[in-house]
Image: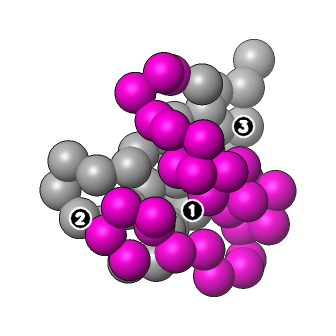
Amino acid sequence: MASKYNEKEIKAIEAKELHPESKVICPRCGKELSYRAVGNSYEIKCPTPNCLEATFRGL
């Protein structure tokens, strides 16, 4: 994971990654993180511009 996120932010991204159906709140702005899967890739993103965003690609 990129070092631009602190430990609390990484834990929120990991929580959404492990349980995409659960409600996970962004530690930066308080909005709910979204999970979007496309094929074997997925994205975890906060709806606030320039906030948390993580993209994972499968092989």
User: Which corner quadrant holds the C terminus?
Assistant: top right
Please tell me the numbered disc located at residue 48. Answer: 2
Instruction: Name the residue type under label 3.
Output: Asn
Q: Residue furthest left?
A: 49
Measuring 48% from the left and 21% from the top, which residue is drawn there? 3
Q: How many residues crowd around disc 3 within 10 Å: few (fewer than 14), some, or many (20 or more)?
A: few
In front: label 2 or label 3 = 2
Q: Which residue is mark 1?
A: 35
Q: First in sequence, mark 2 or 1: give its number.
A: 1
Q: Is residue 48 above or below residue 44?
A: below
Please tell me the numbered disc located at residue 40. Answer: 3
Give the secondary structure at mark 1.
strand
Q: CA distance from mark 2 to mark 1?
A: 14 Å
Residue 36 position in % (x across, y down) = 55, 58
Q: Is residue 39 left or right of residue 44?
A: right
In front: label 1 or label 3 = 1
In front: label 2 or label 1 = 2
Q: CA distance from mark 1 to mark 3?
A: 13 Å
Q: CA distance from mark 2 to mark 3?
A: 25 Å
Instruction: Name the residue type under label 1.
Output: Tyr
Q: Is residue 52 above or below residue 4?
A: below
Residue 7 position in % (x across, y down) = 60, 41
Q: Is residue 37 visible to the viewer in this orientation of the structure? A: no
